[in-house]
């Protein structure tokens, strides 16, 4: 009997061994993979068509196609550059400043999972990150809308992705020096929003104001289009922040909760201030507040709880509203579609306050930092991250605009082309046949 029991035990062990070995060798989780596949589609949906429609509705009718064309073309160019070498520069092993070329042309990305996402295919991680590389330079076009040459847009966006986005992505997410310092940026407060916002401000200052600004009214031509795009952005942001958990667990669910609450709070805060200040709430105001709430929660979406998200969203609505008034009315800077005061200021605010609300000792406002968390130390790290990303972006953008102008004989269209509208002047097409 004893011998029979021993043989039975041996048989069961042999039967289970192949399954155990297979389970240990395969790190890919189908649930995580399915979620990041979905998130990838959602983030691309943010640019094409979300951001495209959001921006296109905000410009004058004679420039609607130029905005749609710029977003579409940037999506194409950024994807190919990301495939060629920018992904490798951002996420492969390198030095403190930039990664190497070991994954150029996606070499080896499908062989093993990336260390940042151990439960999904490496190819999927590269594709998911590609959608972030698509939307970031597309955000900047709102600053120079209605007045930059199309050739300049393409060259500048390409150079900017290589020189600014790739290195800063490596600093924060790819193992670079800010990553090693422990900077908190869950989904792109610094990598996406601060870089795009600072680049937008520098570009707006260098290209100068549209003819007639600020005396000539330049209202949005189609707010129906804008609010349609805004809704797409809100939905897509679930993939942007929730997908950054790179798994289909509680982290993704909590990121989506705080994203949604911050967007709602930011929308209402902006609407109420505008209602009180100008007498009526506007559609433009409520959707701009939404974007402010979403951009501000982005760096904190993996580190804070729901109560803190509402505080962050309300703060975003208030701070970004007054930043917009300051830029447009006080300083008379024609950041046409408010990229810096919404994305830049929101990204800075969110990247800073995450150090506060990540603390696990704030009662209902607590985050998920753990027991030995030092708020003071983290505030120092976040401040260094904000200053370094903003400073590097500003200097690099200034140089790249100069280079682009030299390559294209000036980055700005002629006064006659601007008056006619970029749709006809640059593309020989019209957005509306009425």
Image: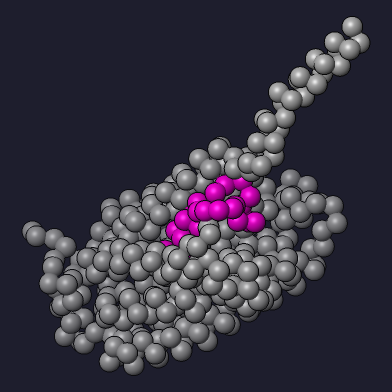
In the rendered image, the vertical position of residue 210 relative to residue 281, given as above or below:
below
Which residue shows up at 58% across the image and 82% down it? 391
Residue name at image x 38 percent, y 80 percent: 156
- Residue 422 relative to residue 410: left or right: left
Find residue 199 and report its horizontal and vertical position in percent. Answer: 47, 78
Farthest residue to the right: give it: 2
Closer to the camera in the image, 46 or 408: 408
Q: In the picture shown, does residue 289 fall above or below 334?
A: above
* Coordinates of residue 229 in the picture (x, y in percent): 34, 54
Is the N terminus in the top left, top right, bottom left or bottom right quadrant? top right
Please tell me in which quadrant of the rendered image residue 214 appears. bottom left
Instruction: Determine which quarter of the picture holds residue 254.
Output: top right
Q: Is residue 420 visible?
A: yes
| Quadrant of the frame with the C terminus | bottom left
Q: Which residues are magenta?
A: 110-134
In reply to whether residue 112 is colored magenta, the answer given is yes
Q: Is 403 situated left or right of 239 in this image?
A: left
């Amino acid at each position: 009997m004893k011998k029979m029991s021993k043989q039975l035990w041996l048989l069961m062990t042999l039967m289970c061994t192949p399954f155990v070995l297979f389970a240990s060798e395969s790190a890919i989780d189908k649930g995580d993979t399915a979620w990041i596949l979905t998130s990838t589609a959602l983030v691309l949906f943010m640019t094409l068509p979300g951001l495209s429609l959001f921006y296109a509705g905000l410009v004058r009718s004679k420039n609607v196609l130029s905005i749609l064309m710029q977003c579409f073309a940037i999506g194409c160019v950024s994807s190919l550059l990301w495939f060629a070498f920018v992904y490798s520069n951002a996420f492969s092993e390198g030095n403190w400043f930039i990664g190497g070329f070991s994954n150029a042309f996606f070499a080896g990305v499908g062989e093993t999972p990336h260390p940042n996402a151990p439960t999904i295919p490496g190819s999927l991680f590269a594709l998911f990150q590609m959608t972030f590389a698509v939307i970031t330079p597309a955000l900047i076009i709102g600053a120079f809308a209605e007045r930059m040459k199309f050739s300049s847009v393409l060259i500048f966006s390409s150079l900017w992705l290589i020189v600014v986005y790739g290195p800063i992505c490596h600093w924060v997410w790819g193992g670079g020096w800010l990553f090693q310092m422990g900077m908190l940026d869950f989904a792109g407060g610094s990598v996406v929003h601060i870089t795009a916002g600072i680049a937008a401000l520098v570009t707006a200052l260098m290209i100068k104001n549209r003819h007639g600004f600020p005396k000539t009214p330049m209202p949005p031509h189609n707010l129906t289009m804008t609010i349609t795009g805004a809704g797409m952005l809100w939905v897509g942001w679930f993939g942007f922040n929730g997908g950054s958990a790179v798994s289909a667990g509680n982290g993704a669910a909590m990121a989506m909760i705080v994203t949604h609450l911050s967007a709602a709070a930011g929308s209402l805060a902006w609407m109420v201030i505008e209602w009180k200040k100008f007498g009526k709430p506007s559609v433009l105001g409520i959707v701009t507040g939404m974007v402010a709430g979403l951009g501000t929660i982005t760096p904190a979406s993996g580190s804070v709880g729901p109560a803190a998200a509402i505080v962050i969203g309300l703060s975003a609505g208030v701070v970004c509203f007054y930043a917009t008034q300051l830029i447009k009315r006080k300083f008379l800077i024609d950041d046409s579609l408010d990229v810096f005061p919404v994305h830049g200021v929101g990204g800075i605010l969110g990247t800073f306050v995450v150090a506060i609300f990540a603390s696990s000792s704030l009662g209902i406002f607590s985050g998920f930092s753990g027991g030995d968390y030092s708020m003071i130390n983290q505030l120092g790290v976040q401040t260094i991250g904000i200053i370094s990303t903003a400073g590097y972006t500003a200097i690099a953008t200034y140089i790249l605009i100069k280079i682009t102008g030299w390559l294209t004989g000036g980055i700005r269209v002629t006064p006659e082309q601007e008056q006619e509208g970029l749709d006809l002047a640059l593309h020989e097409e019209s957005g509306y046949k009425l």
